[in-house]
Image (cartoon, helix red, strand yellow):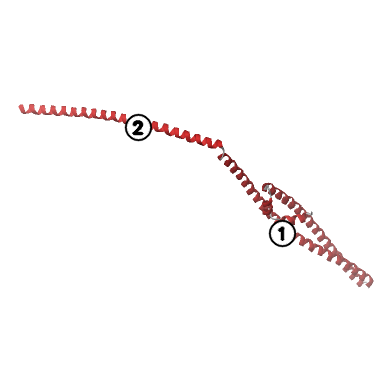
């Protein structure tokens, strides 16, 4: 299969359909990208050869045109010298060369058409390649994500995880009980301390009351002594 036939097949191919049929989409997209890259390199190399051939034909056409003009000049010279036979021979040479020029120019037109077609197809192949590369990244990410989900799901449904979770719940209940006991003891301790605080407060008030009574008694006694005098 020629590189240009392969190029046409790739451009007309449906990447999505290929991936849908593939057992391993990641491997398939990798193969597709490799094929596209290799074809793109070969097509560009072929295009460079066509361009080089076009330059060669262009130079040949210019040379032939110069030769035709030269034979026309010779025909004019022959006629000016009265040599009609030589003029006819020169014009015959010119005619043959003009025919070659026409053939060369037709070949150049064909090469231009080929180059235009190749330019469009290269752009199409590059677009397909870009699309394939983007899909490759998506497929790789989805493959990894699916593998991770499968691993997580396997762990979540395993007996070991379930058993560990049961133990966690058991220990959480034990911790709740211990915290409850500590809170209860703390409440009892605060209640007892409150009672002592009340006793100390009552004692302080009693002492202050006694002191107040003592001051009032002294004041009354002084008032009585003043009255007696």
Q: Picture quarter containing residue 113?
A: bottom right
Residue at (63%, 46%) from the top-left corner?
143
**Neighbours of disc 1 within 10 Å: few (<14), some (14-19), many (20+):** few
Residue 198: x percent and y percent?
A: 27, 30
SS for dot 2? helix
Residue 122: x percent and y percent?
A: 72, 56
Q: Is residue 143 above or below residue 59?
A: above
Q: Give how far apart the Cα atoms at labels 2 and 1 are.
A: 87 Å
**Neighbours of disc 2 within 10 Å: few (<14), some (14-19), many (20+):** few
Q: How many marks?
A: 2
Q: Nearer the viewer, residue 190 or 20?
A: 20
Kindly identify which residue carries mark 1: 120
Q: Is residue 92 above or below residue 166?
A: below
Q: Picture quarter containing residue 207?
A: top left
The reply to whether residue 88 is visible in this rendering is: yes
SS for dot 1? helix
The quarter in which the N terminus is drawn is bottom right
Horizontally, residue 99 falls left or right of residue 147, namely right
Q: Picture quarter containing residue 208?
A: top left
Residue 201: x percent and y percent?
A: 25, 30
Residue 8: x percent and y percent?
A: 74, 57
Kindly identify which residue carries mark 2: 187
Residue at (74%, 58%) from the top-left corner?
118
* Marks 2 and 1, the one that precedes in the sequence: 1
Residue at (40%, 33%) from the top-left corner?
180
The quarter in which the C terminus is drawn is top left
Residue at (14%, 29%) from the top-left corner?
216
Q: Is residue 82 above or below residue 101?
A: below
Horizontally, residue 154 falls left or right of residue 69, namely left
């Amino acid at each position: 299969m020629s590189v240009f036939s392969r190029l046409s097949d790739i451009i007309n191919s449906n990447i999505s359909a290929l991936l849908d049929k593939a057992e391993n989409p990641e491997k398939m997209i990798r193969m597709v990208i490799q094929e596209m890259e290799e074809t793109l390199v070969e097509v560009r190399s072929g295009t460079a050869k066509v361009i080089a051939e076009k330059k060669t034909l262009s130079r040949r056409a210019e040379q032939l045109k110069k030769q035709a003009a030269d034979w026309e000049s010779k025909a004019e010279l022959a006629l000016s010298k009265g040599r009609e036979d030589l003029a006819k021979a020169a014009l015959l040479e010119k005619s043959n060369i003009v025919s070659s020029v026409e053939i060369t120019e037709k070949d150049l037109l064909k090469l231009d058409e080929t180059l235009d077609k190749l330019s469009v197809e290269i752009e199409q192949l590059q677009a397909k390649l870009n699309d394939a590369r983007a899909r490759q990244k998506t497929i790789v990410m989805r493959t990894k994500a699916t593998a991770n989900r499968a691993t997580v799901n396997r762990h979540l449904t395993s007996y070991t995880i379930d058993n560990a979770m049961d133990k966690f719940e058991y220990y959480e209940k034990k911790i709740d009980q211990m915290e409850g006991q500590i809170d209860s003891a703390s409440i009892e301790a605060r209640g007892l301390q409150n009672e002592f605080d009340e006793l100390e407060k009552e004692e302080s008030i009693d002492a202050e009351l006694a002191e107040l009574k003592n001051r009032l008694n002294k004041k009354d006694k002084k008032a009585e002594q003043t009255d007696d005098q």
